[in-house]
Image: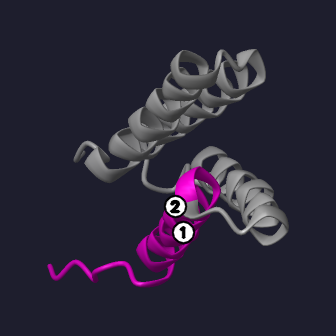
Amino acid sequence: MPVDIPGFAYAAVVAAGGIMGYVKSNSIPSLGAGLLFGSLLGMGAYRISQDPNNFTPLLGTSAALGCLMGYRYYNTGKIMPAGVIALMSAAMVVRIAAMQFYKPVKLQ
């Protein structure tokens, strides 16, 4: 089974963003949210690597993070970090949906 490299990369970016938010502005909520969402996304990427039909944790966490950061982008208008994470989350949701709806057919 292939490793979900985009899923793990997305999880790492979210966790690193939380750490960066803590370092730059000493924001403990940013650190907590980044590490929480990053670890949930990492768990989801691991699960989808083990079984491609077990996409629910990654899809749910990506959708929740996308909605949360999309709302923040709508209110603040700041592209960094809210707009970028909302866009990455939307891309991940579309990617997971495409993986589930367009599965290759195995020929025997």
**If the image is split into quadrants, where does the C terminus sit?**
bottom left
| Callout 2 crowding tier (Cα within 10 Å): few <14, some 14–19, many ≥20 | some
Q: Where is residue 82 in the image (x, y as percent from the top left)?
A: 64, 56
Q: Residue furthest front?
A: 25
User: Which residue carries the number 1 mark?
Assistant: 87
Residue shown at 68% from the left, 47% from the top: 61
User: Which residue carries the number 2 mark?
Assistant: 84
- On screen, residue 67 above or below 58: below
Q: Where is residue 63 in the image (x, y as percent from the top left)?
A: 70, 60
In this orientation, which residue lies closer to the viewer: 23 or 49? Answer: 23
Q: Are marks 1 and 2 in contact (CB under 8 Å)?
A: yes
Query: Is-magenta flag for residue 93?
Result: yes
Query: Is-magenta flag for residue 11?
Result: no
Colour scheme in the image? one colour
Main secondary structure along the magenta-highlighted residues: helix
Q: Is residue 66 left or right of residue 21?
A: right
Please give the range of residues in magenta: 80-108
Gap in angstroms between the C-alphas marked 1 and 2: 5 Å
Q: Is residue 39 left or right of residue 3?
A: right
Identity, as a three-letter code, of the amino acid under mark 2: Val
Residue shown at 71% from the left, 28% from the top: 33
- In the structure shown, which secondary structural element does the residue marked by tag 1 occupy? helix
- Count of picture labels: 2
